[in-house]
Amino acid sequence: MIDGVKTKALKIIPDERGRLMEMLREDDDLFIRFGQIYLTTAYPGVVKGWHYHRKQTDHFVVVKGMMKVVLYDGREDSPTYGEVNEFFMGEHNQILLQIPPFVYHGFKCISETEAMVVNIPTEKYDYQSPDEYRVDPHDNQIPYDWNRKDG
């Protein structure tokens, strides 16, 4: 796994009324700080990526549908420089994914309906000076192909 990336199996508490899923608690080992919480979505087959942050650590939870979340370690001083990680997250694999600063990340909706990601970043979004550095999802130096791999 890419250095600094962590996952947490999520606790789901079902009962006759429905279910509750805890995502991130302040007493979790991987909790750093709270910036804000937001929801982002993707339609089937859509790729959103690549980007990275210089300050912010992200915490992704896919709450509806399925996403393929992909990370690339472009940090030249990292022991996992050049490594790619794929995480299949969502209704069939409920995990929280912690993504450290300077790790490129993106996702693709792999379900038949819109997928929804909740992110709990450590920093709030700064509209005047966003901590977001984008790279084209298909035309870049990242050794990854977003196409489905049949076989």
Image (tube, helix red, strand yellow):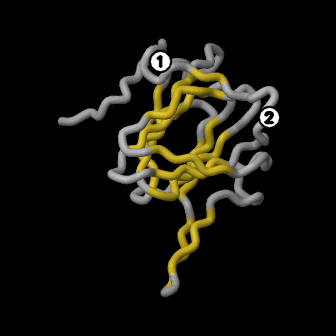
**At x 44% / y 34%, what residue is drawn?**
47
**At x 47% / y 44%, what residue is drawn?**
42
At label 2, counting other C-alpha atoms closer than 10 Å, the crowd grade (few under 14, some 14-19, many 20 or more) is few
Please name the amino acid that badge 2 sits on. Answer: Asp
**At x 36% / y 39%, what residue is drawn?**
45
Compared to 7, does 149 lie above or below? above
The quarter of the image holding the C terminus is top left
Say which label, 2 or 1, has the lower sequence index: 2
The residues bearing labels 2 and 1 have C-alpha atoms spaced at a distance of 27 Å
Q: Which residue is mark 2?
A: 126
Q: Which residue is mark 1?
A: 142
Name the foreground residue: 50 vs 85.
50
Residue 82 x %, y %? 50, 18
Name the foreground residue: 145 vs 115.
115
Please name the amino acid that badge 1 sits on. Answer: Ile
Residue 58 x %, y %? 66, 41
